[in-house]
């Protein structure tokens, strides 16, 4: 498995960040219905776990909302490691847009 580690700074309260980012994967499933097959997102306070399946590949990880950043850690199949930079950039852009 290849690892993803993304840190996204923010200047909002934890509550504001949570309101803007929780269920973000569910909205992405709707947006990319032809690509994302399933999404599971569970939150316990400011800590979230996610699993998604896209085109037969499973991706899982965690998201932590901290005072000044969002930390995203995940694992994806080695077959996707060639696209790691593109995937990380897409995740970063999606979260940054949600925080606006």
Image (cartoon, helix red, strand yellow):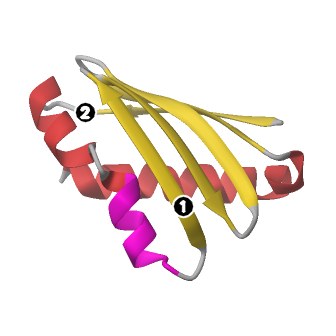
Q: Is residue 54 left or right of residue 77?
A: left
Q: Bin the neighbour count of mark 1 within 10 Å (Cα to Cα): few under 14, some 14-19, many 20 and up.
A: some
Residue 20 lies left or right of residue 60; in this view the side is left
Magenta span of residues: 25-33
The picture quadrant where one finds residue 44 is top left
Secondary structure beneath dot 2 equals: loop
Left or right: residue 1 versus residue 35 is right
> Magenta region, mostly helix, strand or loop?
helix
Q: Which callout, 2 or 1, points at the residue further toward the start of the chain?
A: 2
User: Which image quadrant for residue 19?
Assistant: top left
User: How far from the left and from the top, in percent, is residue 16?
Assistant: 11, 36
> In the rendered image, which residue does mark 1 sit on?
38
Q: Which quadrant is home to the N terminus?
A: top right
Q: Which residue is mark 2?
A: 10
Residue 77 visible in the current orientation: yes
User: In the picture shown, does residue 44 fall above or below 32?
Assistant: above
> In the image, what residue occupies the spot 30% across and 50% down?
23
């Amino acid at each position: 498995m290849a690892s993803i580690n993304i840190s996204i700074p923010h200047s909002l309260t934890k509550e504001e960040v949570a309101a803007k980012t929780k269920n973000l994967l569910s909205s992405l499933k709707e947006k990319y219905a032809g690509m994302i097959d399933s999404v599971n997102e569970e939150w316990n306070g400011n800590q979230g776990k996610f699993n998604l399946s896209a085109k037969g590949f499973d991706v899982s990880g965690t998201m932590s909302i901290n005072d000044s950043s969002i930390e995203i850690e995940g694992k994806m199949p080695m077959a996707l490691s060639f696209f790691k930079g593109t995937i990380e950039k897409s995740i970063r852009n999606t979260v940054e847009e949600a925080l606006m």
